Image (cartoon, helix red, strand yellow):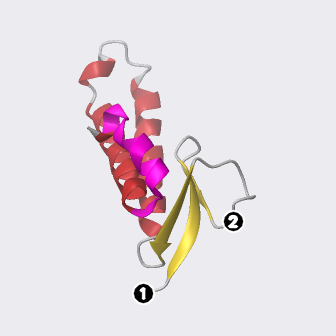
Amino acid sequence: MEKMKLYVSVVNQQVYPHPHDSPWEYEVEITREAAPVFKRIFNQMDRLEFRNFLRAHLPYVPYHSDKDNYDVDRRTMMIYALIHEFTDEESKRFIEQLPYFR
């Protein structure tokens, strides 16, 4: 399978085909078939974060008890696991130090 380079910004929840499109944190080399996974997870996170925004206006629902918040964290862990799978050794070592990855 042919691999392609993509540039992932976890902060901006975006994947870019070219390094100069926008700031990015990680370069990954991934197959065309697997590349849409990043976009799907980022879209799921966006929907969950919007629901968190709506929930934030309900003071009787504590933030730490919110299932949507937990789901955003799980998807963040998925993103870092995907990046770890397809990135270079330096980025892998960095990701292995993150609390999300442990």
Task: Specify few, some or many for label 1: CA neighbours under 10 Å numbering under 14, 14-19, or 20 or more.
Answer: few
Which residue is labeled 2 in the image? 18
Q: Which residues are magenta?
A: 86-100
Secondary structure beneath disc 1? loop
Which residue is labeled 1 in the image? 1
Residue 67, above or below 88? above
Task: Specify few, some or many for label 2: CA neighbours under 10 Å numbering under 14, 14-19, or 20 or more.
Answer: few
Q: Amino acid at mark 2?
A: His
Of 3 and 52, nearer the camera is: 3
Q: Is residue 6 left or right of 101 when viewed as pictured?
A: right
Secondary structure beneath disc 2? loop
Q: Is residue 13 left or right of 48 when viewed as pictured?
A: right
Q: Amino acid at mark 1?
A: Met
Q: Is residue 41 left or right of 8 when viewed as pictured?
A: left
Residue 38 lies, in percent from the top left, at 45, 60
Q: Is residue 95 magenta?
A: yes
Q: Which residue is located at x 69 percent, y 47 percent? A: 23
Which quadrant is home to the N terminus?
bottom left
Residue 27, above or below 67? below
